[in-house]
Amino acid sequence: MSECLRREIADQVSHLQTEKGIVPGLAVILVGNDPASEIYVRNKGNGCREVGIYSETITLPEDTTQTALEAEIDRLNQDQQIHGILVQLPLPKHLDEAAALARILPEKDVDGFHLLNAGKLMTGGIGVTPCTPKGALYMIHQTGMDLSGKQAVVIGRSNIVGKPMALLLLQENCTVTICHSRTKNLPEITRQADILVAAVGKAGFVTPDMVKPGAIVIDVGINRVDGKVRGDVDFDGVKEVAGWITPVPGGVGKMTITMLLQNTLEAAERAGQ
């Protein structure tokens, strides 16, 4: 699924370069040396090369100041070769993530985290959609299910996944319930879901008894357990109940990077209009 979409993106990148002389450009700022972040950044660079997007990684030391970080963002905001800017999260604790994300020009905010883009999503406007929810919705569409009127349950209420995922499903005319750590009778609620999205950050949290037979189950979780990556869903058990389920690894994670590539391409296309 992701491979097919990346081929389409590569064709569009080539067309944009041929027709308008524009090569989409993505800059990733990595502060410190968090091993997981380094892997994510490397995968993003590999994805860019795969589809013909120019990419550069700016690596800043762990003790980088807020002023220095924002100065780098300002420089990239002015760089016409760069159409997308991504600050790899999490940042070291002494840095203000919200202030750094707000510094990125909304049109270059390919993560979709800027308050203006979040507001457009909330109000149904046209902005940049966060990559993980956008990728999850793309995968749901590939099942062929008519989403109008379906019951959707999202477990998790983060600004990065849970809330935007719920808004996207609402735009598809689903009836959406957001569950979280204070939700009571969670299994009763999840068993009503035609579409269940797990973004809770706990390995194997969703068990077969929590899933409606035939439901679409989207596992957004990435949890490291005994050196292995596991999702929020008990895959082996739930796959016997669900009608369609995404694996971890190899599911939403790869699609997230694919949507980052698409957001960068779209930012370049807007810049060329």
Image: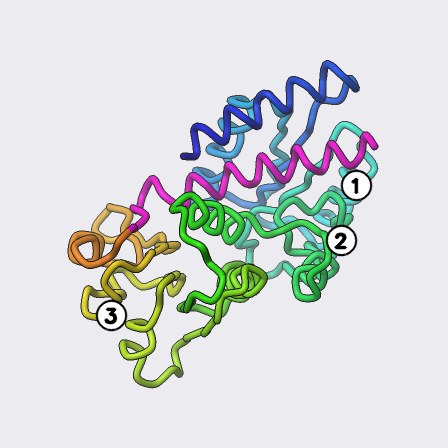
- Which amino acid type is shown beneath numbered disc 2? Arg
Residue 264: give x, y in percent of width and height.
Answer: 65, 36
Label 3 or label 2, whichever lies nearer to me, is 3
Q: Nearer the viewer, residue 102 or 191?
A: 191
Q: Please give the label number shown on residue 103.
A: 2
Instruction: Residue 93: tell me if it is visible.
Output: no
Say whether marks 2 and 1 touch (CB < 8 Å): yes
Say whether marks 3 and 2 touch (CB < 8 Å): no
Residue 13: give x, y in percent of width and height.
Answer: 64, 23
**How far apart, in angstroms, are the residues tagged by discs 3 and 2?**
41 Å
**How far apart, in angstroms, are the residues tagged by discs 3 and 1?**
46 Å
Q: Secondary structure at mark 1?
A: helix
Above or below for 85 versus 215: above
**How far apart, in angstroms, are the residues tagged by discs 2 and 1?**
9 Å
- Left/right placement of residue 185 relative to residue 182 reads left
Taken as a whole, is the magenta stretch helix, strand or loop?
helix
**Residue highlighted by disc 1:** 77
- Left/right placement of residue 169 relative to residue 16 reads left
Say whether marks 3 and 1 touch (CB < 8 Å): no
